[in-house]
Amino acid sequence: MIKHIVMFRFRREVTADQKRALLMEYPDFPDLHPQMKAFDIGRNRSRRDSWFDYAFVIELKSWDDLDRYLEGAEHEDHVVSRFRPLIEDRAIVSFEYTPGTHDFLGDPLG
């Protein structure tokens, strides 16, 4: 299984309505992207690091599914026309894991 994590921070000048409009797109993502096995999004409530405003986590079955999602027309349209214009900073991490095990590193150097 693959976890794809995106953390992001809005530009200062982005209005509450613009933020709301973008965030309201995410509940429909699993319907638009059948490769997704799970999708969760939430506001950052960390008391230690508030650099990012929100994060979402997507679970997919394989690297091929992640590639299909990332290369899909719906994803590209969302990223280029609606996400990037509002986002100041972001971090993205994708990693492979085996559900139900503690072998979370696999090959730590691979």
Image (tube, rainbow, N blue to C red):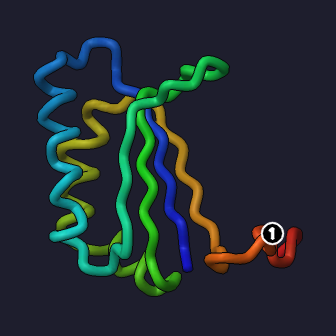
SS category of the residue bearing label 1: loop
- In the picture, which quadrant includes the C terminus? bottom right
Q: Nearer the viewer, residue 96 or 75?
A: 96
Q: Specify the quadrant of the image occupied by residue 33.
A: bottom left
- Residue 106 location in percent, x, y? 81, 77
Work out which residue is located at the far top of the displayed protein and give it. Answer: 13
What kind of residue is marked 1?
Answer: Leu
- Residue, disc 1: 105
Q: Residue at x 35, y 60 (%)?
A: 39
Q: What residue appears at the point 37 percent right and 53 percent down from the top-left corner?
A: 40
The answer to which image quadrant residue 58 occupies is bottom left
Which residue is at 18% across, 46% downward?
81
Residue 70 location (% of width, % of height):
36, 69
Farthest-out residue, front: 100
The picture places residue 29, in percent across and down from the top left corner, at 22, 61
Q: 88 and 30: which one is in front? A: 30
